Amino acid sequence: MPNKRDLNLSEYNISKYAYHELFAFCLQYPEKKRQLVNTRNALGCQQYSDMPHGSTVGNPTEQAAIKAIKLSADTELIEHTAFEVDSGLYQWLLLAVTEDVPYKFLKSLKSIPYYEKGFYKARRKFFYLLAKKKGMI
């Protein structure tokens, strides 16, 4: 991110490094969605083979279910926070915070209902609410 300018969230009492943590958490959203689908598809599936294999301690189905719950909670946290900021801006805000899509590209891609200043204000509010929900402030 050498050419990317950080958001100034000092008015929300969020430090530069806390913002980096929140930003990285949001960028993992697409990856977590893919893992969630893969984990849910693998739940309870037995794989039969005549090849020898080692045994692991624990219950793999239980571990997969716990992983699916954690991934689901993380993705829902991001989605609900974006929806809480503004339901009309939800889809664009989600693209901006999870895939780092800039406002100018969003504006050319779709008819975004906000002007640039209003969009950036909503994005700052998103990070504030996310920090609050994660217990960072």
Image (cartoon, helix red, strand yellow):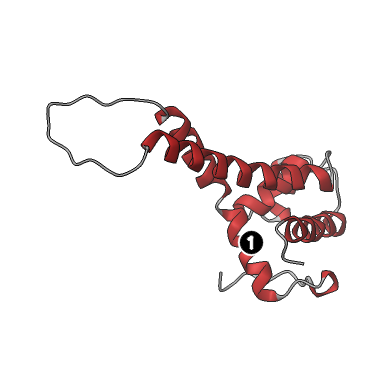
Which x, y percent locates residue 23?
63, 61
Q: Which residue lies furthest to the left in this view?
A: 51
The foreground one among 21 and 120 is 21
Position of residue 137 relative to residue 119, above or below, is below
Which x, y percent locates residue 64?
44, 38
Q: For the C terminus, which image quadrant?
A: bottom right
Please give the name of the residue rendered at 76% of the width and 46% of the height, measured from the top-left corner.
82
Please give the name of the residue rendered at 83% of the width and 48% of the height, measured from the top-left corner.
85
Q: Residue furthest front?
A: 57
Which residue is labeled 1 in the image? 23
Position of residue 52 relative to residue 26, above or below, is above
Which x, y percent locates residue 1?
56, 69
The foreground one among 107 and 74 is 74
Horizontal side of 71 relative to 54 (left or right) equals: right
Which x, y percent locates residue 19?
68, 68
Determine the secondary structure under disc 1. Answer: helix
When asked about the image quadrant of residue 24, the answer is bottom right
The count of marks equals 1
Residue type, label 1: Phe
Please give the name of the residue rendered at 84% of the width and 44% of the height, measured from the top-left corner.
86
Horizontal side of 8 relative to 11 (left or right) equals: left
When asked about the image quadrant of residue 39, the answer is top left
The foreground one among 108 and 129 is 129
The foreground one among 66 and 124 is 66
Please give the name of the residue rendered at 79% of the width and 61% of the height, measured from the top-left corner.
128
Task: Check disc 1: other Cα within 10 Å, few if <14, some if 14-19, many if 20+.
Answer: some
Horizontal side of 40 relative to 80 (left or right) equals: left
